[in-house]
Image (cartoon, rainbow, N blue to C red):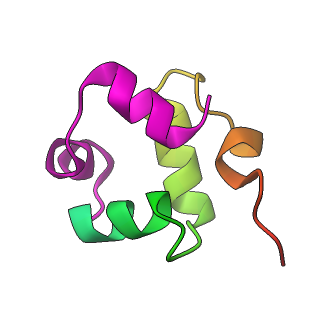
Amino acid sequence: MKPKAWREKQGLSFEKLGEMLGFSPGYLCDVEGGKKTGSVRLAKAYKKASKGEVTLEDFFSGVTA
C-alpha cells in the first residue's frame, strides 16, 4: 500500500503522522507530494508504523535515480 493511501486509511494528518514517525509534517507532505524523495529511514518508519502494510517497495515505487 502506498504511504498516502495508508495515511488516509488511518485518518492521520501530517502533524499526527509526523509525531508517530519522528519527522516534520512539512517533510512528510513534500515526500507524499513528490517534491522530495523519502529516505530509507522514513520508509522503514512507515513499514514499522503500518505493521508491514507499507513495504519498502511500495514506498519507493515510481522513484527514479
Establish if 59 lies above or below 24. above
- Image location (x, y in percent) of residue 10: 31, 22
User: Chief secondary structure of the magenta span?
Assistant: helix
Q: Residue furthest front?
A: 33
- Image location (x, y in percent) of residue 20: 25, 42
Image side of residue 37 versus residue 27, left or right: right
Identity of the residue drawn at 26% across and 70% down: 26
Residue 11 covered by magenta stretch: yes
**Total residue callouts:** 0
Establish if 41 lies above or below 34. above
Identity of the residue drawn at 46% across and 57% down: 32
Image side of residue 48 versus residue 16, left or right: right
- Image location (x, y in percent) of residue 39: 57, 67
- Image location (x, y in percent) of residue 7: 37, 34
Question: Residue 59 or 4: which is nearer the viewer?
Answer: 4
Q: Which quadrant of the figure has residue 13?
A: top left
Quadrant of image for the C terminus? bottom right
Identity of the residue drawn at 45% across and 28% down: 6
Quadrant of image for the N terminus? top right
Image side of residue 25 versus residue 40, left or right: left
Q: Which residues are magenta?
A: 1-24
